[in-house]
Amino acid sequence: MILSVLVPTYRQESYIKQCLISILNQKIDFELEILVGDDCSPDNTVGVIEAIAKSDSRIKPVSYTHLRAYETVLDLV
């Protein structure tokens, strides 16, 4: 079994690291993937996500070059 966690984000540079680490630290006995969709954040949210993804292959970043609002979450599913 694999658990897919969807994390849509926008302008969360200060919080996204804590969010992802919290998910990764859960004690589970099955496979996990974290799909992180950033909706064209103007801050460094994408940089933080990519840095964490480099050290953990369970994180799958998805970034957009223009605002997509609710479509961001739908694309992750």
Image (cartoon, helix red, strand yellow):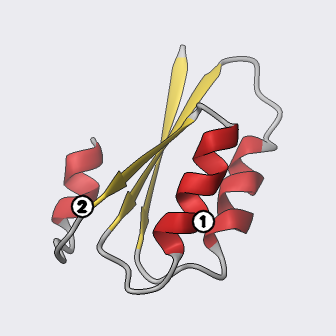
Residue type indicated by callout 2: Thr
Position in image of residue 72 (x %, y %): 24, 61
Residue found at x 54% / y 54%: 50
Q: Residues within 10 Å of mark 1 (few under 14, many from 20)?
A: some
Residue found at x 54% / y 79%: 12
User: Is residue 22 positioned above or below 69 on the image?
Assistant: above
Q: CA–CA distance between discs 1 and 2?
A: 18 Å
The residue that label 1 is drawn on is: 48
User: Is residue 1 positioned above or below 47 on the image?
Assistant: above
Q: Indicate left or right for 74 with 34 as reference.
A: left
Q: Quadrant of residue 59?
A: top right
- Image quadrant occupied by the N terminus: top right
Position in image of residue 6 (x %, y %): 44, 49
Q: Which mark is residue 29?
A: none
Element type at mark 2: helix
* Near-viewer residue (44 or 60): 44
Q: Quadrant of residue 58?
A: top right
User: Is residue 34 positioned above or below 73 on the image?
Assistant: above
Residue found at x 38% / y 86%: 42
The residue that label 2 is drawn on is: 72
- Image quadrant occupied by the C terminus: top left
Please identify, in this view, whether the residue under mark 1 or under mark 2 is nearer the observer: 1
The disc, 1 or 2, on the residue closer to the chain's N-terminal end is 1
Figure label count:
2
Element type at mark 1: helix
Q: Indicate left or right for 67 with 7 as reference.
A: left
Position in image of residue 38 (x %, y %): 37, 65
Residue type indicated by callout 1: Val
Q: Residues within 10 Å of mark 2 (few under 14, many from 20)?
A: many
